[in-house]
Amino acid sequence: MSSVTLILIVVAVLAVAAAVWMYFEKQRTQKLRSKFGPEYDRAIQEQHGNRKRAEMALESREKRVEMLHIRPLAREDRDRFAEAWRREQARFVDDPRGAVEKADVLVADVMKTRGYPVSDFEQRAADVSVDHPQFVENYRAAHTIALRDKNGQAGTEDLRKAMVHYRVLFEHLLEQRVAEPQEVRR
């Protein structure tokens, strides 16, 4: 075999290996983008600055959550949480700030009961993004409004939006829709 033939074979093998590697990287990207939705873009833009580091972080989240033993709520827990939510939703009329604070606590309590660790907000949001990526944006938006409220920078309409955002994630974590409080129904 001549050296030219050997060089051509090596180049061909390297080209095939590069094509296979690029294919698998593209599949990985598509899988993560599909699974995480807007959280994928957020990870690139806000957290890691580049695609490769963001994808490694998202895969790390997946592995972490796989080890958490997330479980569905028992019927009694679901009913108890649903009732607590109805009370806070009704409370919103008279005490929007208190209702939003309690909504944040209720979401964290549901997460804890289901098996999520509830150390700090960013970790909770990262963990919930693995199984509920379409709802984590609502959680982040509600939390941002709650923080603004603590600084006196959120009005009643902002607090209403926070309750709506919390409710979307809350119902999804609860795995059932929560009925409106009796006095609010029409």
Image (tube, grey):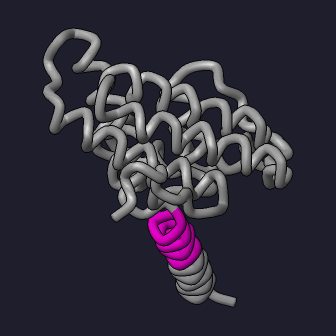
Q: Nearer the viewer, residue 98 or 162?
A: 98
Query: Which x, y percent locates residue 108?
Result: 60, 31
The magenta span reads 22-35
Q: How many marks?
A: 0
Q: Is residue 140 above or below residue 154?
A: below
The reply, left or right, for residue 96 in relation to residue 87 is left
Between 79 and 73, the one lying in front of the other is 79
Inspect the magenta stretch and tell me whether residue 23 lies in it: yes
Dominant SS type (magenta) = helix
Q: Nearer the viewer, residue 105 or 19?
A: 105
Q: Is residue 14 visible?
A: no
Query: Is 73 rendered above or below residue 115?
Result: below
**Which residue is at the far top?**
151
Q: Is residue 18 above or below residue 91?
A: below
Q: Residue at x 21, y 9 (%)?
A: 151
Please give the name of the residue rendered at 28% of the width and 44% of the height, measured from the top-left corner.
Answer: 45
Look at 26% across and 43% down and name the residue there: 161
Hey, which quadrant is residue 120 in on the image? Answer: top right
The quarter of the image holding the C terminus is bottom left
Residue 77 falls inside the magenta stretch: no
The spot of residue 25 in percent (x, y) is: 53, 68
Q: Quadrant of the N terminus?
A: bottom right
Residue 68: which quarter of the image? top right
Q: Where residue 91 sits in the image (x, y, percent)? A: 40, 31
Residue 45: tell me if it is visible: yes
Left or right, 132 with respect to 33, comes to right
Tell me what residue is drawn at x 46 percent, y 56 percent.
Answer: 180
Q: Position of residue 177 (x, y in %)?
A: 56, 63
